[in-house]
Protein backbone atom coordinates (compact mmCIF):
# COMPACT_ATOMS: atom_id res chain seq x y z
CA UNK A 1 0.00 0.00 0.00
CA UNK A 2 1.35 3.43 -0.92
CA UNK A 3 2.43 5.54 2.01
CA UNK A 4 2.03 9.29 1.96
CA UNK A 5 3.77 11.84 4.10
CA UNK A 6 1.89 14.52 5.97
CA UNK A 7 -0.53 16.40 3.74
CA UNK A 8 1.44 19.60 4.22
CA UNK A 9 4.19 18.01 2.14
CA UNK A 10 2.01 17.16 -0.85
CA UNK A 11 2.96 20.02 -3.17
CA UNK A 12 -0.11 19.75 -5.42
CA UNK A 13 -2.60 19.43 -2.56
CA UNK A 14 -5.68 21.43 -3.52
CA UNK A 15 -5.09 21.08 -7.26
CA UNK A 16 -7.70 19.37 -9.44
CA UNK A 17 -7.03 17.94 -12.89
CA UNK A 18 -9.33 16.44 -15.51
CA UNK A 19 -7.90 13.99 -18.04
CA UNK A 20 -9.15 12.40 -21.22
CA UNK A 21 -7.68 9.48 -23.16
CA UNK A 22 -6.43 5.99 -22.48
CA UNK A 23 -2.71 5.20 -22.69
CA UNK A 24 0.01 3.92 -20.38
CA UNK A 25 1.61 7.37 -20.55
CA UNK A 26 -1.58 9.05 -19.34
CA UNK A 27 -2.11 6.46 -16.60
CA UNK A 28 1.43 7.00 -15.31
CA UNK A 29 0.97 10.79 -15.35
CA UNK A 30 -2.27 10.44 -13.39
CA UNK A 31 -0.53 8.24 -10.81
CA UNK A 32 2.36 10.66 -10.38
CA UNK A 33 0.03 13.68 -10.03
CA UNK A 34 -2.06 11.88 -7.39
CA UNK A 35 1.11 11.04 -5.47
CA UNK A 36 1.88 14.77 -5.44
CA UNK A 37 -1.54 15.51 -3.94
CA UNK A 38 -3.51 16.47 -7.06
CA UNK A 39 -7.08 15.21 -7.37
CA UNK A 40 -7.41 13.61 -10.82
CA UNK A 41 -10.59 12.49 -12.55
CA UNK A 42 -11.01 11.19 -16.06
CA UNK A 43 -13.61 12.59 -18.44
CA UNK A 44 -15.38 10.30 -20.89
CA UNK A 45 -14.47 10.38 -24.55
CA UNK A 46 -11.39 9.94 -26.66
CA UNK A 47 -8.19 11.93 -26.64
CA UNK A 48 -8.26 15.05 -28.85
CA UNK A 49 -6.37 15.03 -32.18
CA UNK A 50 -3.55 17.15 -30.81
CA UNK A 51 -3.03 14.81 -27.86
CA UNK A 52 -3.42 11.24 -29.15
CA UNK A 53 -1.88 9.74 -25.99
CA UNK A 54 -4.03 11.84 -23.65
CA UNK A 55 -4.76 15.33 -22.35
CA UNK A 56 -4.39 16.76 -18.82
CA UNK A 57 -6.21 19.97 -17.87
CA UNK A 58 -5.88 21.68 -14.51
CA UNK A 59 -9.22 23.08 -13.40
CA UNK A 60 -8.22 24.13 -9.90
CA UNK A 61 -4.84 25.36 -8.71
CA UNK A 62 -3.76 26.16 -5.14
CA UNK A 63 -2.41 29.59 -4.39
CA UNK A 64 -5.28 32.00 -5.11
CA UNK A 65 -5.09 31.94 -8.92
CA UNK A 66 -8.37 32.91 -10.55
CA UNK A 67 -7.12 33.36 -14.07
CA UNK A 68 -8.23 31.14 -16.88
CA UNK A 69 -7.24 29.16 -18.75
CA UNK A 70 -5.11 27.22 -16.30
CA UNK A 71 -2.15 25.09 -17.37
CA UNK A 72 -2.54 21.80 -19.18
CA UNK A 73 -0.44 19.15 -20.87
CA UNK A 74 -0.98 17.29 -24.15
CA UNK A 75 0.62 13.86 -24.58
CA UNK A 76 1.69 13.03 -28.12
CA UNK A 77 3.40 9.98 -29.58
CA UNK A 78 5.70 11.49 -32.21
CA UNK A 79 5.94 15.15 -31.23
CA UNK A 80 8.39 16.89 -33.57
CA UNK A 81 9.56 13.58 -35.11
CA UNK A 82 8.15 13.27 -38.61
CA UNK A 83 7.59 9.51 -38.47
CA UNK A 84 4.01 8.24 -38.05
CA UNK A 85 3.66 6.71 -34.59
CA UNK A 86 0.55 5.32 -32.95
CA UNK A 87 1.92 3.66 -29.83
CA UNK A 88 4.81 2.27 -27.83
CA UNK A 89 5.93 -0.26 -30.44
CA UNK A 90 6.30 2.45 -33.06
CA UNK A 91 8.25 4.68 -30.68
CA UNK A 92 10.68 1.92 -29.67
CA UNK A 93 11.27 1.08 -33.33
CA UNK A 94 11.67 4.58 -34.72
CA UNK A 95 13.69 6.15 -31.89
CA UNK A 96 16.44 3.56 -31.44
CA UNK A 97 15.28 1.72 -28.31
CA UNK A 98 14.74 -1.59 -30.09
CA UNK A 99 18.13 -1.21 -31.79
CA UNK A 100 19.98 -0.48 -28.54
CA UNK A 101 18.17 -3.11 -26.47
CA UNK A 102 18.99 -5.73 -29.08
CA UNK A 103 22.54 -4.63 -29.85
CA UNK A 104 24.08 -7.13 -27.41
CA UNK A 105 22.08 -9.96 -29.03
CA UNK A 106 22.95 -9.10 -32.63
CA UNK A 107 19.66 -7.56 -33.80
CA UNK A 108 16.71 -5.33 -32.79
CA UNK A 109 14.62 -6.47 -29.81
CA UNK A 110 11.64 -4.71 -28.30
CA UNK A 111 11.64 -3.99 -24.60
CA UNK A 112 9.14 -6.05 -22.65
CA UNK A 113 7.89 -2.91 -20.88
CA UNK A 114 6.24 0.24 -22.24
CA UNK A 115 9.35 2.17 -21.35
CA UNK A 116 8.88 5.26 -23.52
CA UNK A 117 5.29 5.58 -22.31
CA UNK A 118 6.31 5.35 -18.65
CA UNK A 119 8.97 8.02 -19.17
CA UNK A 120 6.50 10.22 -21.06
CA UNK A 121 4.01 9.92 -18.20
CA UNK A 122 6.60 11.10 -15.69
CA UNK A 123 7.55 13.96 -18.00
CA UNK A 124 3.88 14.99 -18.29
CA UNK A 125 3.52 15.11 -14.51
CA UNK A 126 6.72 17.18 -14.42
CA UNK A 127 5.27 19.61 -16.95
CA UNK A 128 2.11 20.11 -14.89
CA UNK A 129 4.09 20.56 -11.66
CA UNK A 130 6.50 22.97 -13.34
CA UNK A 131 3.59 25.01 -14.72
CA UNK A 132 1.99 25.29 -11.27
CA UNK A 133 5.39 26.30 -9.87
CA UNK A 134 5.64 29.04 -12.50
CA UNK A 135 2.23 30.34 -11.41
CA UNK A 136 3.24 30.21 -7.75
CA UNK A 137 6.28 32.35 -8.60
CA UNK A 138 4.15 34.96 -10.35
CA UNK A 139 4.69 33.70 -13.90
CA UNK A 140 2.22 33.07 -16.72
CA UNK A 141 -0.07 30.09 -17.18
CA UNK A 142 1.72 27.65 -19.48
CA UNK A 143 0.47 24.81 -21.63
CA UNK A 144 2.87 21.94 -22.29
CA UNK A 145 3.23 19.19 -24.85
CA UNK A 146 5.13 15.99 -24.10
CA UNK A 147 6.09 13.40 -26.68
CA UNK A 148 6.83 9.71 -26.09
CA UNK A 149 9.30 9.82 -28.98
CA UNK A 150 11.36 12.49 -27.24
CA UNK A 151 11.13 10.55 -23.98
CA UNK A 152 12.68 7.61 -25.82
CA UNK A 153 15.42 9.83 -27.20
CA UNK A 154 16.47 10.72 -23.65
CA UNK A 155 17.49 7.09 -23.23
CA UNK A 156 19.08 6.83 -26.66
CA UNK A 157 20.67 10.30 -26.45
CA UNK A 158 24.19 9.53 -25.19
CA UNK A 159 24.45 6.69 -27.73
CA UNK A 160 23.30 9.01 -30.53
CA UNK A 161 25.85 11.61 -29.46
CA UNK A 162 28.61 9.00 -29.58
CA UNK A 163 27.44 7.68 -32.95
CA UNK A 164 27.51 11.16 -34.48
CA UNK A 165 30.98 12.06 -33.19
CA UNK A 166 33.43 12.63 -36.06
CA UNK A 167 35.21 9.56 -37.38
CA UNK A 168 33.17 6.96 -35.55
CA UNK A 169 32.95 3.41 -36.82
CA UNK A 170 29.68 1.50 -36.38
CA UNK A 171 29.59 -0.04 -32.87
CA UNK A 172 30.37 -3.71 -32.47
CA UNK A 173 27.34 -5.95 -32.17
CA UNK A 174 27.21 -8.60 -29.49
CA UNK A 175 26.46 -12.27 -29.89
CA UNK A 176 23.59 -14.19 -28.28
CA UNK A 177 24.56 -15.30 -24.79
CA UNK A 178 27.83 -13.33 -24.72
CA UNK A 179 26.78 -10.73 -22.15
CA UNK A 180 26.05 -11.21 -18.43
CA UNK A 181 24.19 -12.28 -16.29
CA UNK A 182 26.14 -15.27 -15.00
CA UNK A 183 24.90 -18.63 -13.70
CA UNK A 184 26.22 -20.44 -10.62
CA UNK A 185 26.46 -24.22 -10.42
CA UNK A 186 23.02 -24.50 -8.78
CA UNK A 187 21.44 -22.60 -11.69
CA UNK A 188 21.04 -19.30 -9.84
CA UNK A 189 21.57 -16.36 -12.17
CA UNK A 190 23.25 -13.19 -10.94
CA UNK A 191 24.78 -9.87 -11.98
CA UNK A 192 28.01 -8.41 -10.62
CA UNK A 193 29.27 -4.86 -10.48
CA UNK A 194 32.59 -3.20 -9.83
CA UNK A 195 34.16 0.00 -11.06
CA UNK A 196 37.62 -1.16 -9.96
CA UNK A 197 39.91 -3.22 -12.22
CA UNK A 198 41.73 -4.67 -9.20
CA UNK A 199 38.46 -5.91 -7.70
CA UNK A 200 37.52 -7.47 -11.06
CA UNK A 201 40.88 -9.27 -11.16
CA UNK A 202 40.59 -10.48 -7.58
CA UNK A 203 37.04 -11.82 -8.05
CA UNK A 204 37.72 -13.84 -11.17
CA UNK A 205 41.10 -15.05 -9.92
CA UNK A 206 39.35 -16.34 -6.80
CA UNK A 207 36.92 -18.26 -9.02
CA UNK A 208 39.79 -19.79 -10.98
CA UNK A 209 39.46 -17.95 -14.31
CA UNK A 210 42.51 -17.67 -16.55
CA UNK A 211 44.38 -14.32 -16.38
CA UNK A 212 44.05 -13.87 -20.15
CA UNK A 213 40.26 -14.17 -19.99
CA UNK A 214 40.08 -11.82 -17.01
CA UNK A 215 42.16 -9.20 -18.81
CA UNK A 216 40.21 -9.56 -22.06
CA UNK A 217 36.86 -9.19 -20.33
CA UNK A 218 37.51 -6.05 -18.30
CA UNK A 219 37.43 -3.42 -21.10
CA UNK A 220 34.10 -4.74 -22.40
CA UNK A 221 32.61 -4.97 -18.90
CA UNK A 222 33.77 -1.46 -18.04
CA UNK A 223 32.43 0.10 -21.25
CA UNK A 224 29.06 -1.67 -21.41
CA UNK A 225 27.20 1.38 -20.05
CA UNK A 226 28.38 3.37 -23.05
CA UNK A 227 28.30 0.72 -25.78
CA UNK A 228 25.27 -1.43 -24.84
CA UNK A 229 27.32 -4.55 -25.63
CA UNK A 230 29.38 -6.74 -23.31
CA UNK A 231 31.00 -9.64 -25.21
CA UNK A 232 32.87 -11.46 -22.43
CA UNK A 233 35.18 -14.46 -22.90
CA UNK A 234 33.22 -17.70 -22.33
CA UNK A 235 35.88 -18.75 -19.79
CA UNK A 236 34.40 -16.27 -17.31
CA UNK A 237 30.93 -17.76 -17.53
CA UNK A 238 32.49 -21.22 -17.13
CA UNK A 239 34.34 -20.11 -13.99
CA UNK A 240 31.11 -18.77 -12.49
CA UNK A 241 29.24 -21.97 -13.42
CA UNK A 242 31.85 -24.09 -11.63
CA UNK A 243 31.14 -22.41 -8.28
CA UNK A 244 28.05 -22.64 -6.13
CA UNK A 245 26.26 -19.46 -5.09
CA UNK A 246 27.86 -19.37 -1.64
CA UNK A 247 31.30 -19.58 -3.27
CA UNK A 248 30.43 -16.77 -5.67
CA UNK A 249 29.18 -14.61 -2.81
CA UNK A 250 32.32 -15.30 -0.79
CA UNK A 251 34.56 -14.40 -3.71
CA UNK A 252 32.61 -11.20 -4.31
CA UNK A 253 32.86 -10.25 -0.64
CA UNK A 254 36.61 -10.84 -0.54
CA UNK A 255 37.17 -8.84 -3.72
CA UNK A 256 34.80 -5.99 -2.90
CA UNK A 257 32.55 -6.79 -5.87
CA UNK A 258 28.78 -6.24 -5.59
CA UNK A 259 26.38 -9.02 -6.53
CA UNK A 260 22.61 -9.16 -7.11
CA UNK A 261 20.46 -12.17 -7.95
CA UNK A 262 17.95 -11.93 -10.77
CA UNK A 263 14.55 -11.78 -9.11
CA UNK A 264 11.09 -12.00 -10.56
CA UNK A 265 9.05 -8.82 -10.65
CA UNK A 266 6.60 -10.39 -8.19
CA UNK A 267 9.35 -11.24 -5.70
CA UNK A 268 10.89 -7.79 -6.02
CA UNK A 269 7.53 -6.09 -5.47
CA UNK A 270 6.68 -8.28 -2.49
CA UNK A 271 9.89 -7.40 -0.63
CA UNK A 272 10.18 -3.74 -1.66
CA UNK A 273 9.45 -0.92 0.75
CA UNK A 274 6.15 0.83 0.14
CA UNK A 275 6.79 3.71 -2.26
CA UNK A 276 6.47 7.14 -0.77
CA UNK A 277 7.59 10.67 -1.43
CA UNK A 278 10.71 11.17 0.67
CA UNK A 279 10.04 14.90 0.96
CA UNK A 280 10.51 16.78 4.18
CA UNK A 281 11.09 20.38 5.24
CA UNK A 282 14.51 21.38 6.50
CA UNK A 283 12.94 23.74 9.02
CA UNK A 284 14.79 26.81 7.72
CA UNK A 285 12.77 29.57 6.06
CA UNK A 286 14.14 31.44 3.07
CA UNK A 287 13.25 34.41 0.94
CA UNK A 288 10.46 34.00 -1.64
CA UNK A 289 11.53 32.39 -4.90
CA UNK A 290 12.12 34.98 -7.63
CA UNK A 291 9.56 35.48 -10.39
CA UNK A 292 10.28 33.76 -13.73
CA UNK A 293 12.17 35.88 -16.22
CA UNK A 294 10.74 34.09 -19.27
CA UNK A 295 8.16 31.52 -20.31
CA UNK A 296 10.46 28.69 -19.20
CA UNK A 297 9.06 27.43 -15.86
CA UNK A 298 12.38 27.41 -13.95
CA UNK A 299 13.84 30.60 -15.42
CA UNK A 300 15.41 32.74 -12.71
CA UNK A 301 16.34 29.74 -10.55
CA UNK A 302 19.83 28.36 -9.99
CA UNK A 303 20.80 24.72 -9.55
CA UNK A 304 24.17 23.61 -8.17
CA UNK A 305 24.84 20.03 -9.26
CA UNK A 306 27.42 17.62 -7.84
CA UNK A 307 26.78 14.45 -9.82
CA UNK A 308 28.42 11.85 -12.03
CA UNK A 309 27.66 9.25 -14.71
CA UNK A 310 24.02 9.32 -16.03
CA UNK A 311 21.29 9.65 -13.39
CA UNK A 312 22.46 12.89 -11.79
CA UNK A 313 23.74 14.71 -14.90
CA UNK A 314 20.55 13.94 -16.85
CA UNK A 315 18.42 15.17 -13.95
CA UNK A 316 20.41 18.42 -13.95
CA UNK A 317 20.06 18.73 -17.72
CA UNK A 318 16.28 18.36 -17.49
CA UNK A 319 16.17 21.19 -14.94
CA UNK A 320 18.31 23.28 -17.29
CA UNK A 321 15.92 22.50 -20.14
CA UNK A 322 13.12 23.82 -17.93
CA UNK A 323 14.98 27.12 -17.74
CA UNK A 324 17.22 26.85 -14.67
CA UNK A 325 20.83 27.99 -14.62
CA UNK A 326 22.92 24.90 -13.72
CA UNK A 327 26.44 24.97 -12.28
CA UNK A 328 28.36 21.74 -11.78
CA UNK A 329 30.84 21.07 -8.97
CA UNK A 330 33.62 18.91 -10.41
CA UNK A 331 36.88 17.58 -8.94
CA UNK A 332 40.20 19.24 -9.77
CA UNK A 333 40.95 18.59 -13.42
CA UNK A 334 37.26 18.18 -14.20
CA UNK A 335 34.91 15.20 -14.20
CA UNK A 336 36.84 12.13 -15.43
CA UNK A 337 33.92 11.36 -17.77
CA UNK A 338 34.95 14.39 -19.84
CA UNK A 339 37.81 12.32 -21.27
CA UNK A 340 35.90 9.14 -22.20
CA UNK A 341 35.96 8.49 -25.99
CA UNK A 342 34.61 9.22 -28.48
CA UNK A 343 35.76 12.80 -28.20
CA UNK A 344 34.43 16.00 -29.75
CA UNK A 345 37.39 18.31 -29.58
CA UNK A 346 38.53 18.09 -25.96
CA UNK A 347 35.27 16.75 -24.51
CA UNK A 348 33.59 13.36 -24.49
CA UNK A 349 30.56 13.20 -26.79
CA UNK A 350 28.56 11.31 -24.17
CA UNK A 351 29.50 13.79 -21.45
CA UNK A 352 28.54 16.69 -23.69
CA UNK A 353 25.15 15.14 -24.42
CA UNK A 354 24.29 15.16 -20.70
CA UNK A 355 26.07 18.30 -19.52
CA UNK A 356 25.88 20.83 -22.34
CA UNK A 357 24.94 24.34 -21.33
CA UNK A 358 26.11 23.91 -17.74
CA UNK A 359 28.83 25.93 -16.07
CA UNK A 360 31.42 24.14 -13.94
CA UNK A 361 33.45 25.03 -10.86
CA UNK A 362 36.28 22.76 -9.70
CA UNK A 363 36.53 22.00 -5.99
CA UNK A 364 38.30 19.24 -4.08
CA UNK A 365 35.66 18.25 -1.54
CA UNK A 366 38.27 16.25 0.34
CA UNK A 367 39.83 19.51 1.52
CA UNK A 368 38.51 22.29 3.75
CA UNK A 369 39.08 24.84 0.99
CA UNK A 370 37.15 22.78 -1.53
CA UNK A 371 34.25 22.25 0.87
CA UNK A 372 34.19 25.96 1.58
CA UNK A 373 34.01 26.69 -2.16
CA UNK A 374 31.10 24.27 -2.51
CA UNK A 375 29.28 25.78 0.47
CA UNK A 376 29.66 29.28 -0.91
CA UNK A 377 28.35 28.10 -4.26
CA UNK A 378 25.38 26.33 -2.66
CA UNK A 379 24.53 29.55 -0.82
CA UNK A 380 23.88 31.20 -4.21
CA UNK A 381 21.53 28.42 -5.37
CA UNK A 382 17.88 27.48 -5.05
CA UNK A 383 18.56 23.75 -5.59
CA UNK A 384 21.50 21.53 -4.60
CA UNK A 385 21.41 18.28 -6.61
CA UNK A 386 23.75 15.38 -5.88
CA UNK A 387 23.94 11.61 -6.37
CA UNK A 388 26.48 10.74 -3.71
CA UNK A 389 25.98 7.67 -1.51
CA UNK A 390 23.92 8.32 1.65
CA UNK A 391 25.78 10.29 4.32
CA UNK A 392 28.37 11.87 2.03
CA UNK A 393 26.62 15.26 1.83
CA UNK A 394 26.93 15.61 5.61
CA UNK A 395 30.57 14.49 5.46
CA UNK A 396 31.23 17.28 2.93
CA UNK A 397 29.43 19.84 5.09
CA UNK A 398 26.67 20.18 2.49
CA UNK A 399 23.72 18.67 4.34
CA UNK A 400 20.58 20.64 5.25
CA UNK A 401 21.81 21.37 8.78
CA UNK A 402 25.23 22.45 7.51
CA UNK A 403 23.71 24.94 5.07
CA UNK A 404 20.74 26.08 7.17
CA UNK A 405 22.34 29.40 8.07
CA UNK A 406 23.90 30.39 4.73
CA UNK A 407 21.16 28.87 2.50
CA UNK A 408 18.00 28.54 4.63
CA UNK A 409 15.55 28.11 1.76
CA UNK A 410 17.68 25.68 -0.24
CA UNK A 411 16.07 22.63 -1.85
CA UNK A 412 18.30 19.58 -1.38
CA UNK A 413 17.77 16.83 -3.99
CA UNK A 414 19.43 13.49 -3.35
CA UNK A 415 19.36 11.23 -6.42
CA UNK A 416 20.06 7.99 -4.57
CA UNK A 417 20.49 4.40 -5.67
CA UNK A 418 18.88 1.79 -3.44
CA UNK A 419 17.02 3.95 -0.88
CA UNK A 420 16.94 1.03 1.54
CA UNK A 421 16.21 -1.73 -0.99
CA UNK A 422 19.79 -2.96 -1.62
CA UNK A 423 20.53 -6.64 -2.25
CA UNK A 424 23.16 -6.57 0.47
CA UNK A 425 25.19 -4.23 2.69
CA UNK A 426 27.32 -1.84 0.69
CA UNK A 427 26.05 -3.00 -2.71
CA UNK A 428 26.98 -0.59 -5.49
CA UNK A 429 23.84 1.06 -6.87
CA UNK A 430 24.28 0.90 -10.64
CA UNK A 431 21.75 0.33 -13.37
CA UNK A 432 22.25 -3.36 -14.12
CA UNK A 433 22.23 -4.44 -10.47
CA UNK A 434 19.04 -2.43 -9.94
CA UNK A 435 17.43 -4.04 -13.00
CA UNK A 436 18.35 -7.51 -11.71
CA UNK A 437 17.39 -7.03 -8.07
CA UNK A 438 14.36 -4.87 -8.89
CA UNK A 439 12.67 -7.38 -11.19
CA UNK A 440 13.05 -5.28 -14.34
CA UNK A 441 15.11 -7.99 -16.04
CA UNK A 442 12.21 -10.38 -15.50
CA UNK A 443 9.76 -7.98 -17.17
CA UNK A 444 12.01 -7.57 -20.20
CA UNK A 445 12.12 -11.25 -21.11
CA UNK A 446 10.10 -12.26 -24.15
CA UNK A 447 8.46 -15.65 -24.68
CA UNK A 448 11.05 -18.41 -24.29
CA UNK A 449 13.77 -15.97 -23.20
CA UNK A 450 15.68 -16.02 -19.93
CA UNK A 451 15.48 -12.79 -17.94
CA UNK A 452 18.43 -10.46 -18.36
CA UNK A 453 18.95 -6.75 -17.73
CA UNK A 454 18.94 -4.53 -20.78
CA UNK A 455 22.29 -2.96 -21.52
CA UNK A 456 20.30 0.16 -22.32
CA UNK A 457 20.49 2.00 -18.98
CA UNK A 458 16.78 1.95 -18.20
CA UNK A 459 16.78 2.75 -14.48
CA UNK A 460 19.51 5.38 -14.82
CA UNK A 461 17.40 7.38 -17.28
CA UNK A 462 14.06 6.87 -15.55
CA UNK A 463 15.80 7.51 -12.22
CA UNK A 464 17.01 10.85 -13.62
CA UNK A 465 13.43 11.74 -14.54
CA UNK A 466 12.28 10.91 -11.03
CA UNK A 467 15.06 13.03 -9.52
CA UNK A 468 14.02 15.99 -11.68
CA UNK A 469 10.40 15.35 -10.66
CA UNK A 470 11.55 15.37 -7.02
CA UNK A 471 13.28 18.71 -7.53
CA UNK A 472 10.10 20.23 -8.99
CA UNK A 473 7.95 18.81 -6.19
CA UNK A 474 10.33 20.19 -3.56
CA UNK A 475 10.51 23.59 -5.26
CA UNK A 476 6.72 23.81 -5.32
CA UNK A 477 6.55 22.84 -1.65
CA UNK A 478 9.21 25.46 -1.00
CA UNK A 479 7.19 28.09 -2.88
CA UNK A 480 4.04 27.25 -0.92
CA UNK A 481 5.52 26.99 2.57
CA UNK A 482 8.58 29.28 2.41
CA UNK A 483 10.67 26.51 3.97
CA UNK A 484 13.71 24.76 2.57
CA UNK A 485 13.14 21.15 1.51
CA UNK A 486 14.99 17.85 1.24
CA UNK A 487 13.83 15.22 -1.26
CA UNK A 488 15.31 11.81 -1.98
CA UNK A 489 14.61 9.66 -5.03
CA UNK A 490 16.33 6.48 -6.15
CA UNK A 491 17.13 4.14 -9.01
CA UNK A 492 15.14 1.57 -7.03
CA UNK A 493 12.10 3.84 -7.44
CA UNK A 494 12.51 3.61 -11.21
CA UNK A 495 12.50 -0.19 -10.99
CA UNK A 496 9.40 -0.04 -8.82
CA UNK A 497 7.59 2.23 -11.26
CA UNK A 498 8.36 -0.14 -14.15
CA UNK A 499 7.11 -3.08 -12.07
CA UNK A 500 3.86 -1.35 -11.33
CA UNK A 501 3.42 -0.42 -14.99
CA UNK A 502 3.79 -4.13 -15.77
CA UNK A 503 4.65 -5.94 -18.96
CA UNK A 504 4.11 -4.08 -22.20
CA UNK A 505 1.89 -5.04 -25.07
CA UNK A 506 3.59 -7.60 -27.31
CA UNK A 507 4.50 -6.08 -30.71
CA UNK A 508 4.00 -9.27 -32.73
CA UNK A 509 1.83 -8.81 -35.76
CA UNK A 510 1.86 -5.04 -35.65
CA UNK A 511 2.85 -2.83 -38.52
CA UNK A 512 4.76 0.38 -38.06
CA UNK A 513 8.17 1.90 -38.67
CA UNK A 514 11.05 -0.53 -39.11
CA UNK A 515 13.51 -0.55 -36.22
CA UNK A 516 16.33 1.96 -36.60
CA UNK A 517 19.59 0.23 -37.50
CA UNK A 518 22.00 3.18 -37.51
CA UNK A 519 21.72 5.88 -34.86
CA UNK A 520 23.79 8.40 -36.81
CA UNK A 521 21.55 7.96 -39.86
CA UNK A 522 18.46 8.29 -37.67
CA UNK A 523 19.68 11.54 -36.12
CA UNK A 524 20.55 13.05 -39.51
CA UNK A 525 17.26 12.04 -41.18
CA UNK A 526 14.98 14.98 -42.09
CA UNK A 527 12.19 13.41 -40.03
CA UNK A 528 14.27 13.93 -36.86
CA UNK A 529 15.36 17.51 -37.55
CA UNK A 530 12.96 18.85 -34.92
CA UNK A 531 14.18 16.45 -32.22
CA UNK A 532 17.94 17.12 -32.26
CA UNK A 533 20.29 20.08 -32.00
CA UNK A 534 23.85 20.05 -33.31
CA UNK A 535 26.22 20.83 -30.44
CA UNK A 536 29.95 20.77 -31.09
CA UNK A 537 29.35 18.70 -34.20
CA UNK A 538 27.27 15.96 -32.56
CA UNK A 539 23.51 15.41 -32.37
CA UNK A 540 21.99 16.10 -28.94
CA UNK A 541 18.33 15.53 -28.06
CA UNK A 542 16.12 18.54 -27.50
CA UNK A 543 13.89 19.07 -24.46
CA UNK A 544 11.11 16.46 -24.30
CA UNK A 545 8.44 19.07 -23.62
CA UNK A 546 7.46 22.38 -25.16
CA UNK A 547 5.80 25.20 -23.21
CA UNK A 548 3.69 28.05 -24.49
CA UNK A 549 1.29 30.56 -22.88
CA UNK A 550 -2.00 28.82 -22.18
CA UNK A 551 -4.48 29.52 -24.98
CA UNK A 552 -8.22 29.41 -25.14
CA UNK A 553 -8.54 25.67 -25.55
CA UNK A 554 -12.10 24.35 -25.21
CA UNK A 555 -12.65 22.55 -21.93
CA UNK A 556 -15.86 20.83 -20.92
CA UNK A 557 -14.95 21.17 -17.26
CA UNK A 558 -15.98 23.38 -14.31
CA UNK A 559 -14.28 26.76 -13.94
CA UNK A 560 -11.18 27.00 -11.81
CA UNK A 561 -11.67 27.35 -8.07
CA UNK A 562 -9.02 29.18 -6.08
CA UNK A 563 -7.43 28.14 -2.80
CA UNK A 564 -6.26 31.03 -0.58
CA UNK A 565 -2.61 31.90 -1.09
CA UNK A 566 -0.20 30.20 1.31
CA UNK A 567 -2.73 27.61 2.48
CA UNK A 568 -1.88 23.96 1.98
CA UNK A 569 -5.04 21.89 2.53
Image (tube, helix red, strand yellow):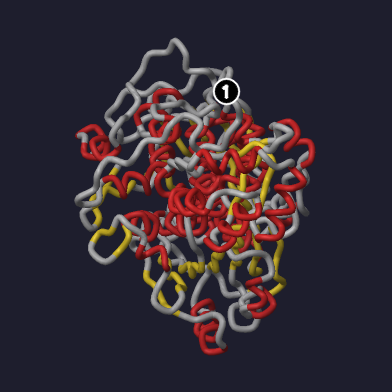
| Residue lying at 39% horizontally and 42% vertically, measured from the top left | 156
Front residue (pair 1, 190): 190
Front residue (pair 333, 74): 333
Q: Residues within 10 Å of mark 1 (few under 14, many from 20)?
A: few
Q: Is residue 484 above or below residue 508?
A: below
Front residue (pair 216, 157): 216
Check disc 1 and report its element: helix, strand or loop: loop
Residue 242 image point, x, y percent: 67, 39
Count the marks: 1
Q: Is residue 454 above or below residue 333?
A: above
The residue furthest top is 509
Q: Is residue 297 left or right of residue 251?
A: left
| Residue lying at 27% horizontally and 29% vertically, measured from the top left | 82
Residue 480 image point, x, y percent: 63, 60
Q: In the rendered image, which residue does mark 1 sit on?
A: 449
Q: Is residue 26 left or right of residue 6?
A: left
Q: Is residue 364 left or right of residue 79?
A: right
Figure quadrant of the N terminus: top right
Residue 132 image point, x, y percent: 53, 51
Amino acid sequence: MTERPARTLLPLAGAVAHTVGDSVALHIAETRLRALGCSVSRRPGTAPPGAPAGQIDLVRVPGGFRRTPLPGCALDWAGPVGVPMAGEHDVQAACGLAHLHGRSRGGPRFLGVDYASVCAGVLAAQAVTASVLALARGGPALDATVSAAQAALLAAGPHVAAATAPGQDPPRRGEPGAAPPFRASDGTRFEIETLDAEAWLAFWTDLGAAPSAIAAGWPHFQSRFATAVCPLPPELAAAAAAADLSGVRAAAHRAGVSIALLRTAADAEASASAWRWRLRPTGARGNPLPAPRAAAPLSGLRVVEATSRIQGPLAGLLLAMLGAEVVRIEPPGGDPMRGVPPMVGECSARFLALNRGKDAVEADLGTAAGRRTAQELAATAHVLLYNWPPGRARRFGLGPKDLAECAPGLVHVHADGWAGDAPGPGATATDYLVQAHGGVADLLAGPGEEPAPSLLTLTDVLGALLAAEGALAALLARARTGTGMHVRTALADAAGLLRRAGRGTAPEGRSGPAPAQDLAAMASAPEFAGAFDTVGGISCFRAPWTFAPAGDRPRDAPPAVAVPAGEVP
